[in-house]
Image: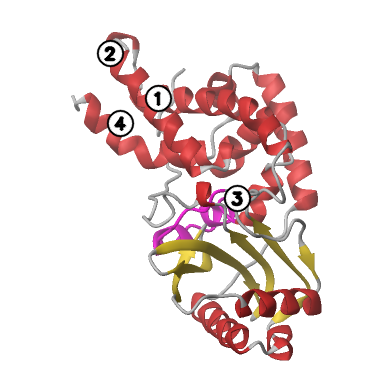
């Protein structure tokens, strides 16, 4: 018999990933996981036949409850709302399903679903749970889950944009982007972007950021050049990966200023997501282990 602490530790990456994909916030996901640990610690073991199944159900229901509570706050958000970025390692990129599911583009599509649709879609399409298993997780009938899953899948399919990038080529493109931005070369910046490129900034009303998405190659290039001109002399950056996408972490002295995430395909930048809201950067430095393995044997 494994200790309750070890059981939870072995499930933690899976639990965090489920909560994060339902909520789109690393801080909220961490709160849900911590609350689930308290519940796990208090429950009588004689009532838990399958610990992983119990923990996944607890996290799923807690995440759903939390998502319903924060929906209104996101509607009143100042400027564009972006998911809280999570720093990811190479192992996440090696899992194509997991990598796509935590990408900024996918998380933004998931924001357009209802809480139930989002949870069902994530559990079915990302983590591979059956409709019967999901019915137990979310507290609905299997028939209802099948209907929700179909509706959510069609919604996502009609809005999803897919980007496949080569990590080496992507880093080269990002390097060229930073060089062109540093010199204010609008023409060079435009040459690195797809015609329909979109730049979204999230400052949350706390720091300066564009209040609406910037669209089009020339508009985005001029916007980037303008932002670069305002950078202080103590600014520096670091190449890294966030949400399984190439990214740059910017600092002003010792202060984390922003995380800029790129969607790159065929050596062209199709999307940029700049997260500047300090509330979303508090835990952005440390890598987050993600996982999507589920129970081999599930018995509700």
Secondary element type, mark 2 = helix
Disc nearer the start of the sequence (3/2): 2
Residue 206 is marked as 3
Label 3 – label 1 distance at C-alpha? 28 Å
Q: Nearer the viewer, residue 300 or 275?
A: 275
Determine which residue is flagged by label 4: 8
Residue 35 is marked as 1
In this image, 93 relative to 205: left or right? left
Q: Position of residue 35 (x, y in %)?
A: 40, 25
In this image, 227 relative to 291: left or right? right
Give the crowd class for mark 3: few <14, some 14-19, many >=20 residues within 10 Å.
Answer: few
Question: Is there any visible trace of residue 294 in the rendered image?
Answer: no
Q: Is residue 37 above or below residue 155?
A: above
Label 2 – label 4 distance at C-alpha? 13 Å
Disc nearer the start of the sequence (4/1): 4
Q: Position of residue 268 (x, y in %)?
A: 68, 79
- Colour style of the rendered protein structure: secondary structure
Residue at 70% in and 33% down: 149
Q: Is residue 127 above or below residue 172?
A: above
Disc nearer the start of the sequence (3/4): 4
Determine which residue is flagged by label 2: 45
Label 4 – label 1 distance at C-alpha? 12 Å
Residues in magenta, as a range:
84-103
Q: Position of residue 155 (x, y in %)?
A: 78, 42
Secondary element type, mark 3 = loop
Give the crowd class for mark 4: few <14, some 14-19, many >=20 residues within 10 Å.
Answer: many
């Amino acid at each position: 018999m494994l200790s309750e602490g070890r059981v939870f530790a072995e499930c933690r990456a899976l639990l965090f990933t489920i909560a994060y994909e339902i909520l789109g916030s690393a801080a909220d996901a961490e709160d849900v996981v911590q609350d689930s640990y308290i519940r796990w610690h208090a429950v009588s073991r004689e009532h838990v036949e399958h610990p992983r199944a119990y923990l996944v159900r607890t996290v799923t229901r807690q995440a759903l409850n939390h998502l319903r509570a924060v929906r209104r706050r996101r509607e009143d958000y100042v400027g564009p709302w972006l998911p809280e970025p999570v720093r990811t390692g190479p192992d996440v990129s090696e899992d194509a399903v997991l990598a796509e599911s935590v990408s900024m583009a996918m998380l933004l599509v998931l924001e357009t679903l209802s809480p139930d649709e989002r949870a069902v879609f994530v559990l079915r399409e990302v983590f591979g749970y059956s409709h019967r298993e999901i019915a137990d997780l979310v507290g609905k009938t299997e028939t209802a889950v099948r209907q929700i899953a179909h509706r959510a899948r069609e919604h996502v399919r009609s809005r999803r944009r897919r980007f496949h990038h080569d990590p080496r080529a992507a880093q080269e493109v990002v390097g060229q982007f930073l060089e062109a931005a540093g010199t204010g070369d609008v023409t060079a910046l435009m040459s690195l972007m797809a015609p329909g490129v979109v730049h979204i900034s999230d400052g949350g009303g706390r720091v300066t950021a564009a209040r609406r998405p910037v669209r089009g190659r020339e508009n985005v290039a001029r916007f980037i050049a303008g932002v670069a001109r305002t950078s202080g002399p103590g600014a520096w950056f670091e190449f890294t990966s966030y949400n399984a996408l190439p990214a740059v972490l910017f600092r002003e002295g010792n202060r984390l200023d922003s995380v800029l995430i790129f969607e790159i395909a065929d050596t062209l930048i199709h999307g940029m997501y700049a997260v500047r809201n300090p509330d979303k950067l508090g835990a952005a430095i440390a890598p987050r282990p993600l996982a999507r393995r589920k129970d081999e044997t599930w018995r509700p």
